[in-house]
Image (cartoon, grey):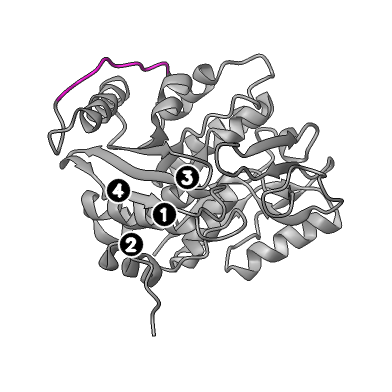
Amino acid sequence: MGKFVTFGEIMLRLKSPGHEKLFQSPVLEASFGGAEANVAVSLANFGLDSVFVTALPVFPPADRAISVLRGFGVDVSFVKRTPGRMGVYYLESGAAQRPSVVFYDRDASSFSSVTPGLFDWGEIFSGAEWFHVSGVSPAVSESAALTCIEAVEAAGKAGAVVSIDLNFRKKLWKYGKKASEIMDVLVSRADILIANEEDIQLSLGIYPGASSASCDGSGEAGKFRKLCAAVREKYRNISAVAVTDRISHSADWNGWEAFLLNDEGFFCSGRYEINDIVDRMGAGDAFAAGFIFGLKEFADGKKALEFAAAASCLKHSYPGDFNLSSKPDVEDLIASGGSGRVKR
């Protein structure tokens, strides 16, 4: 089995306790997170040879972040220690009709200063089977975007499958480039695309009209079928498009399902009604990791989609960015139909 490589920024995550507003009490809960780091942890938990590549300063919290990743079994041997600072994000968890809010503090971070040529991609992708990056990383800075393009091109030359999660973050695209300018280049070099409807609209500029054709006869699924088809029509290199759909009834109760279009056909996952959400941060990354693992493990698009949707559902039950679920955990959820009954 080859290496599964991810590239991005891991940040210090500072969260208000419970559902408090930031600094409502003089306490913040500290942990770590970041899109590609979250995927790397999930892949390691599923038993894959997971490698995370980033740049971090020589700084005690950064040392601890590396140690935490290593503790999950993630290979961090290609992490560069460079000047700068560690990125931070602040999280205020919402409740009922009050939404969660994220505040970024990533300017001048070590990762934002990465440049093409900094990483030895030839060595990194030696024996690599897969490379994953998200739209968060090229949004951080123009030099990070150029480095992402360099990485995707190197991964393709090395024969690795390239997956991209569009992960549009409006608060980050502020260095003069539109998301569509950069993501078009990256997606045109990828094999697998993961996104939600808004990601595709805002990152790729694709706005297909309504459709009634679907896998189950519903107009809602038909909308996603047409959206996926429009992506594959524009990007002929993309062999599979997986799109998630979150229905936010409140901050504590979300509906969750996903759709897939590949050469086998169009598929819809089972739908989960997730009540009493513990932490939804990283749920999309859990889906991405589950989909990557599913495609590798099952060689069946429908099974991969169901595994990814279930893995992401479980992530909502864990505090922190990381999905702590194993393959048996996910399979148990699929088999149980999501009952949540005590296992004795």
Q: Earlier in the sequence, mark 3 or mark 2?
A: 3
Spatial CA span between label 1 and label 3: 10 Å
Q: Is residue 259 left or right of residue 16?
A: left
Image point (32%, 42%), residue name? 258
Q: Quick one: label 3, few (<14), some, or many (20+) residues within 10 Å? A: many
Q: Earlier in the sequence, mark 1 or mark 3?
A: 3
Q: Which residues are magenta?
A: 205-212
Up the image or down, 137 lies above or below 23; here it is above
Residue type (three-letter) at the residue carrying disc 2:
Gly
Residue 79 location (% of width, % of height): 69, 53
Image point (30%, 48%), residue name? 271
Single out the residue that lies furthest toward the front: 96
Question: Please, what secondary structure does the residue beneath circle 2 have?
Answer: loop
Spatial CA span between label 2 and label 4: 10 Å
Is 209 part of what is drawn in magenta?
A: yes
The residue that mark 4 highlights is 271
Spatial CA span between label 3 and label 2: 19 Å
Q: Nearer the viewer, mark 1 or mark 3?
A: 1
Residue 338's label in the rendered image is: 2
Is 327 part of what is drawn in magenta?
A: no
Question: Please, what secondary structure does the residue beneath circle 1 have?
Answer: helix
The residue that mark 1 highlights is 313
Q: Is residue 286 left or right of residue 104?
A: left
Q: Quick one: label 2, few (<14), some, or many (20+) residues within 10 Å? A: some
